[in-house]
Image (cartoon, helix red, strand yellow):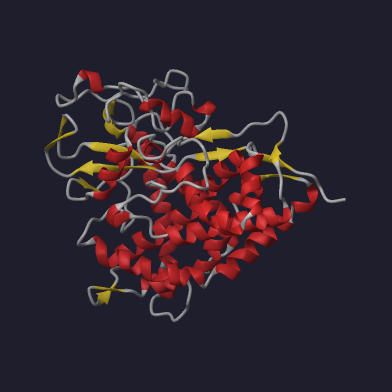
Amino acid sequence: MNDADHGPTISRAPIPENVPEDRIYEINMYALDGIEAGYHETWLKIQQAGVPDLIWTPLTGGHWIATRGDVVREVYSDPSRFCSEVIFLPKAAGEKYAMIPAKLDPPEHTPYRQALDRVLNATQVRKLESRVRQMAADLIATFADRGHCDFVTEYSSLFPIHVFMALADLPLSDVPILSKYAEGMTRPTGNTPEEMAESLDSANLGFFAYVEPIIQRRRGGSGDDMITSVVNSKINGEPMPHDKALGEVALLLLAGLDTVVHLLGYAMAYLAQHPDKVAQLGADEGTLRLGVEEIFRRFPVVSAARMVAKDMHYRGVDLKRGDMILVPTALHNLDEAHNANPMDLDFFRSTVSHSTFGGGPHRCAGLHLARLEVMVTLQEWLRRIPSFSLRDGTRPVFHSGIVAAIGNVELVWPAPN
């Protein structure tokens, strides 16, 4: 794999002495070669026979890539060996990332994660279902009678964000600027690590500048919104430090603005091409509810990273403290060794193995809300639009990055008489 067809020449890092020649592959996580065939399909190509379970690329600053499900799961789950000091690539950009608790490890991580869990645990999320359902229904109603829509621009790029902005008590008018910051962090621009670092840093600082006055206003407040709850949390018995509050609230915004947006887009693009799967979901409510977890398995969009915490021999190579390892969730979820016929969306799997929500102490705090958003979307959509397909002559456009994106999901269905 190479980046020859992706615009300006991308800089290549020198090959370290600890990298064997047979482990070197040219893979650009931000411009996957052949991605026009599909984001997940392209990542899956590197699981072909003969490819080691840990490889190295000189692109994006130079880093390792975990290529098998058991390695992805292990790296996510063991902060003692694979820490979160830097979690974005290239490393020069990841070092600018300042959101917490994502970049902290236990024990420092624990009280900040507890602050998130108090507002995003399963019990709290269940209380939100009626509000979330009404938002989904209202959005679908704007185009259901028309017989067509661009799913990403008219639904998936709006619904999770509307939900999150309501829970955070923030105005929808702020969404465009926040979405711009999210794009700058998860798919930073530039042809060198330094240029990408500048892009990510600018976006990170943009989030901080946005949340600064909001935190100031909500300190000591009694509101029931998500931000007020988080910034007034106690950390080891003391008020949350201001710099940590900036990082924690900014992370809430970033997480709420990108991931579910694109997972929904990938799922609906697939369903539009597989009417048998749509029929299964629409025929039985139990299948739909159980099928949500399979949808998360089949359409992962995150490729985060971890930093090697100490020198070690691992998977046949010598890793050095400070080395970076990319852990694409797709390479666990779509590994044949973990899920038989992994590209099939099988709602009746006896077990579903995936890393869509990461793993270990950093398992996604928003997973309960994400599950609710996907379940409600399917229920409300199929209630009004029981069958649909891609518009003839169109095809989705795929983008890779820390969070993969999808666009041009043009759906059509029989309009009511």
Where is residue 238 shown, x and y percent of the image?
Answer: 25, 76
Q: How many marks?
A: 0
| Quarter residue 49 falls in | top left
**Looking at the figure, which quarter contains the N terminus?**
top left
- Side (left or right) of 35 relative to 67: right
Image position of 229 with respect to 371: above or below? below
The answer to whether any part of residue 7 appears in the image is: yes
- Side (left or right) of 302 relative to 14: right
Where is residue 389 shown, x and y percent of the image?
Answer: 69, 39
Where is residue 236 shown, x and y percent of the image?
Answer: 22, 73
Nearer to me, 201 or 128: 128
Where is residue 57 shown, x and y percent of the image?
Answer: 30, 26
| Quarter residue 174 falls in | bottom right
Name the residue: 30% across, 33% down. 65
Name the residue: 27% across, 30% down. 53
Seen from this angle, which residue lies furthest right?
Answer: 417
Name the residue: 52% across, 47% down. 347
| Quarter residue 327 falls in | top left
Image position of 355 with respect to 226: above or below? above
The answer to whether any part of residue 160 appears in the image is: no
- Side (left or right) of 215 relative to 262: left
Image position of 341 with respect to 25: above or below? below
